[in-house]
Amino acid sequence: MPLLPVRSLFWRAFLTFWSAMALILVCGMLFTAAVAWYRVNSLDGLNPGSLAHDAAQIAREDGADGLERWVAAMDARYSALNIYLVDASDHDILGRALPARLRDWLKDYRAAPPDPFPASSAPSPSVRVSWWDPQLLTLPDGRELLMLFLPFDSSHWELLGLAPVALVIVLFALAVTAPLCWALTRNVTAPLGALRLATQALSAGQLDARTPARLTRRKDELGLLAQDFDAMAGRLQALVGTREQLLRTIAHELRSPLARLQLAVELARRKDERLDLQLDRIEREGERLDALVGNTLALAKMGALPEPADMLDLAEVVDAVVEDARFEAGDRNVGIAWERPAPLRIQGDRESLASAIENVLRNALRFAPTGSSIRLRLLAGLRDVQLEIEDRGPGVPEQELGYLFEPFYRSASGAAMAGSGAGLGLSIARAAVAAHKGRISASNVLPQGLSMRIELPLAAT
């Protein structure tokens, strides 16, 4: 699995955050551009030289009253331009408070005033005049005023103060981020809610509980979690079903020897000439019950076997099992063809692995005809090792091969030769092999016989 899949929750949160930031930035840039366009457009066609010429002419002809009317008209017409007329005391003749910027300009101007225009003449409209230079105006009574321009005025924004502006920005950011955060949270909490409901149903005993299909189709971590949950629920359902079936089968298997045991006890109470026969039968049935209980406990133990961690030589384990089996094979005139290969290292539990191999080998001995031979081969591959145990018995019908490793299963073709076996040997072998992360399979061989194959992973070098 890649470290950061394209549809991971990290990328969804990352992209949601930066999408909100980008949206806020774009809106801010558009707002700033709109304000700048409004300011520039509002001063379109104005020239500070022309305004200074007009103001000087009005000052000579109409005096201060004319200038006041002219400034009021200009303020009403051009909202982005403020014009201030300041006397010698630096007070605006209209009684307005001077912005901080104008006060700084006046301070610098008073410290080093430029050469004013002659009082007898006004600046020509063609003369280049800056918005930022004070202009000297002379009234009919000889008083002098300074005309100050404040273009692109933003002083009305300053009236908002810092706290209201910050509040507006926060509210705008909330308006942008709240829907995106809600969508992101919904995208996470909705699947978690569905997974929680499935978990509650499973804990309540509904073993068929699964997560919704739309959740398992997701490609992020929540989808993977839903798939793992479904796999866990399926495994749990299969495990519980297998245990229940095993209990029912065990109960059924126990009834037959118990019934025969009770019948033998009743017959033994008669104390007739068949008393010894009945006592022998009681002993056999007791041994059969003991073997059944022991095999069932062994099967349960194999199913709960922890992951093996010991280093073993599989060739040595097989060799030890073969040596023990040759005593029984000699009494039945059955040969065992086996040559111990070079050491093959695996991780495993010696006792459980030997039990699995022994069960398969004894099963082959049980069905091997007198005078025949059982062949064992241990073959090493790149990543695993295979143990083949092949006999010359009657084999198994093809349709029954898949059931050989089920608990208490007995093939119809070999039931008569199986004797009093409980049908758990191969089930124990499969459980032990599965605990070693391996697998076991069966197949028929020609002209007759059965081949059992055990595959186990080799230990990492």
Image: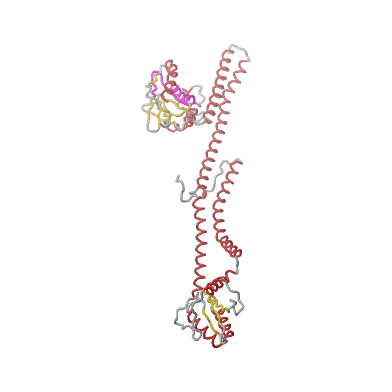
Q: Residue furthest bottom?
A: 61
Residue 337 vs residue 110, the one in the foreground: 110
Residue 154 vs residue 189, the one in the foreground: 154
> Which of the colour schemes (rainbow, by chain, secondary structure, one colour) is used?
secondary structure
Q: Main secondary structure of the magenta part?
A: helix
Q: Residue furthest left?
A: 447
For residue 45, above or below residue 246: below
For residue 275, above or below residue 122: above
| Residue 338, x across and y down, in percent | 38, 21
| Residue 218, x across and y down, in percent | 49, 49
| Residue 59, x across and y down, in percent | 55, 85
Q: Residue at x 58, y 15 (%)?
A: 279
Q: Residue at x 52, y 64 (%)?
A: 28
Q: Residue furthest front?
A: 111
Query: In the rendered structure, does residue 456 fall within the stretch colored magenta?
Result: no
Q: Answer left or right for 255 relative to 434.
A: right
Residue 251: quadrant of the picture: top right
Residue 46 appears anywhere in the view? no
For residue 224, above or below residue 455: below
For residue 108, above or below residue 276: below
Residue 257 vs residue 235, the one in the foreground: 235
Q: Residue furthest top?
A: 273
Quadrant location, the C terminus: top left
Residue 126: quadrant of the picture: bottom left
Query: In the rendered structure, does residue 369 fall within the stretch colored magenta?
Result: yes
Residue 445 appears anywhere in the view? yes
| Residue 119, x across and y down, in percent | 51, 84
Q: Residue at x 54, y 87 (%)?
A: 60
Q: How many marks?
A: 0
Q: Read off the magenta span.
A: 350-376
